[in-house]
Image (cartoon, rainbow, N blue to C red):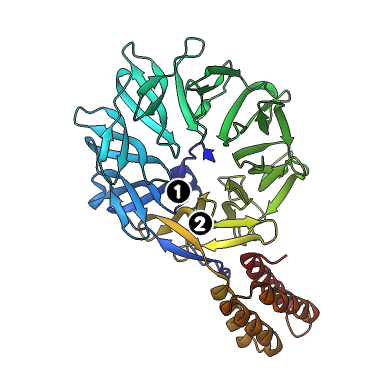
């Protein structure tokens, strides 16, 4: 699944705030600080199915900004530049190749391809001064933008065999390619990268055999523009656009059915889509309240053709901070439907990264200390990347899913300390089953534990204690794949 690149910097600025969170973090994930290249900040941009993370970081004293690649085995590796003082990685594929853009010794910007064997390779331009890569698939096909000899900007597709191919213009206007899927289908549009589909603007798809197909404004929602945000491997598109009433609505577009308005939540009037998977599950945000005065309230949402739009809730936040209408927002979804993003905590001052699943609900991924965090990407194995504030800066982080044993062990320790020994024995039985490889045998004791805790809610356990224990047990069942 190939997604349009969300600006991680903008999202990180949104989440940062200091203070005590006072919230228990579920032990479903291990959080890893990816560090920096010597500076005070790093930003994770893309994540491969093998867990390789790429992005950019400040070097010592933030003197320069360099692209990086991080793996569990090698840590954070400086990918260097093409002779200039800065570079940024935009995409990584399953083979470990990285694409992005870098400054050159001629004070221009060129698209690059980096591999462990060859280092950073300049992909050149379409005859002009500058170029940049925006995405890449597992075949090593790189797409992006380049200036031409006539000082226009055109979308390109690059392969090792064919080099850089000019994908041309739309209605004599500048174009950019912003995504390529595993089938080699390229999607892009004209004018600015962040305003594809604006008034009078068009979206296109391109393949090596079929050439360019002008998709127009994706049919429109009755208003003046549509903005695509993501494309999947089936060539389906999600995004948002204006309706005839002048409000933003999320949409999905398929080659067969065209554009469809996915609507809004409750009493809201606006919604936005930022990601989709191959099952046509779309995630983003929607207003739930649009008052005549004061800020709206926006929640993370998920939409599917079968289930429609659902509210993913929050991590305890109830109303937006002064500078934003957002209480929660979903930014990415994987093939299993696991959704990640950010949400305000109780108190409405701090954003934390979250992971949401249909069976486990929304869980807090935590942060590096008592600070803000955000999750921006998730791969097929459930590994999540994002950012967290640290003293004096912001670091790229990775959340790695834990196996069921650490989750149950942590839950058992919490139950034992609370004096709920009957529940602790059930959890010990579940843990023993996991350790002998009997996954099904662990699901039964966990279900019995949930029933026991429910029976003690408001009695020997407070309502909050019971709800937290039940939520943790259900998350352990999710990790085990219990039905």
Question: Which residue corresponds to mark 1?
Answer: 47
> Viewer-proximal residue, 251 or 326?
251
Q: Is residue 115 above or below residue 223?
A: below
Q: Residue at x 36, y 30 (%)?
A: 132
Tell which of 146 and 289 is nearer to you: 146
Residue found farthest to the right: 455
The percent position of residue 101, horizontal first and vertical second, equals 33, 34
Measured as percent of width and height from the top left, residue 199 is found at 58, 18
Above/below status of 374 relative to 31: above
SS at mark 2 in the image: loop
Residue 81, percent from left and from top: 24, 39
Residue 249 in view in this figure: no
Q: If the image is split into quadrants, where does the C terminus sit?
A: bottom right
The image quadrant of residue 97 is top left
Residue drawn at (31%, 22%) of the image: 125
In the rendering, which numbered label is found on residue 383? Answer: 2
Q: Residues within 10 Å of mark 2 (few under 14, many from 20)?
A: many
Please say if 145 is above or below 410.
above
**Which of the two residues, 164 or 438, is positioned nearer the viewer here?**
438
The image quarter containing residue 257 is top right
User: In this view of the protein, can residue 338 be seen by the observer?
Assistant: yes
Question: As drawn, is 271 to the left or to the right of 191?
Answer: right
Residue appearing at x 31%, y 13% in the figure = 149
The answer to whether mark 1 and mark 2 are in CB contact below 8 A is yes
How dense is the environment of label 1, judged by Cα within 10 Å: few (below 14), some, or many (20 and up)? many
- First in residue order: circle 1 vs circle 2: 1
Between 263 and 482, the residue placed more toward the observer is 482
Residue 156 percent across, percent down from the top left: 41, 23
């Amino acid at each position: 699944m190939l997604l349009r690149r969300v600006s991680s910097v903008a999202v990180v600025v949104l989440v940062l705030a200091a203070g005590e969170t006072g919230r228990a973090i579920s032990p479903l994930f291990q959080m890893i600080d990816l560090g920096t290249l010597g500076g005070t900040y790093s930003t994770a941009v893309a994540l491969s199915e093998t867990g390789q993370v790429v992005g950019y970081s400040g070097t010592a004293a933030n003197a320069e900004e360099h692209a990086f690649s991080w793996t569990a085995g090698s840590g954070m590796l400086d990918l260097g530049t093409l002779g200039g003082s800065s570079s940024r990685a935009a995409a990584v594929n399953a083979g470990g190749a990285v694409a992005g853009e870098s400054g050159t010794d001629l004070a221009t910007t060129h698209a690059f391809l980096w591999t462990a064997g060859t280092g950073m390779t300049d992909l050149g331009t379409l005859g002009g001064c500058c170029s940049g890569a925006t995405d890449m698939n597992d075949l090593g096909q790189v797409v992006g933008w380049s200036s031409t000899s006539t000082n226009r900007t055109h979308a390109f597709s690059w392969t090792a065999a064919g080099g850089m191919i000019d994908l041309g213009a739309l209605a004599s206007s500048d174009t950019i390619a912003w995504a390529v899927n595993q089938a080699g289908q390229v999607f892009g549009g004209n004018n600015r990268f962040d305003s594809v589909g604006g008034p009078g603007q068009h979206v296109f798809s391109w393949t090596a055999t079929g050439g360019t197909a002008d998709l127009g404004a994706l049919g429109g929602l009755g208003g003046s523009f549509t903005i695509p945000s993501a494309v999947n491997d089936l060539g389906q598109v999600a995004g948002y656009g204006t309706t005839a009433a002048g409000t933003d609505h999320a949409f999905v577009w398929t080659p067969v059915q065209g554009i469809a308005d996915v609507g809004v939540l409750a009493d809201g009037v606006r919604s936005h889509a930022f990601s989709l998977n191959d099952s046509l599950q779309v995630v983003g945000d929607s207003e739930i309240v649009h008052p005549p005065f004061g800020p709206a309230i926006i929640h993370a949402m998920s939409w599917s053709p079968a289930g429609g739009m659902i509210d993913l809730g929050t991590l305890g936040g109830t109303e937006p901070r002064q500078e934003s209408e957002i209480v929660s927002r979903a930014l990415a979804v994987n093939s299993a439907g696991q959704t990640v993003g950010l949400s305000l905590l109780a108190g409405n001052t701090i954003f934390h990264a979250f992971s949401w699943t249909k069976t486990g609900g929304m869980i807090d991924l935590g942060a590096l200390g008592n600070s803000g965090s955000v999750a921006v990407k998730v791969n097929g194995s459930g590994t999540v990347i994002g950012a967290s504030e640290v003293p004096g800066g912001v670091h790229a982080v990775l959340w790695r899913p834990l196996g069921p044993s650490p989750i149950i062990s942590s839950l058992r320790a919490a139950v034992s300390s609370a004096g709920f020994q009957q529940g602790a024995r059930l959890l010990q039985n579940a843990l023993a089953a996991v350790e002998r490889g009997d996954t099904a045998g662990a699901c039964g004791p966990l279900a019995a534990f949930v029933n026991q805790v429910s029976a003690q809610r408001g009695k020997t356990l407070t309502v909050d204690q019971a709800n937290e224990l039940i939520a943790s047990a259900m998350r352990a069942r999710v990790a085990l794949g219990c039905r």
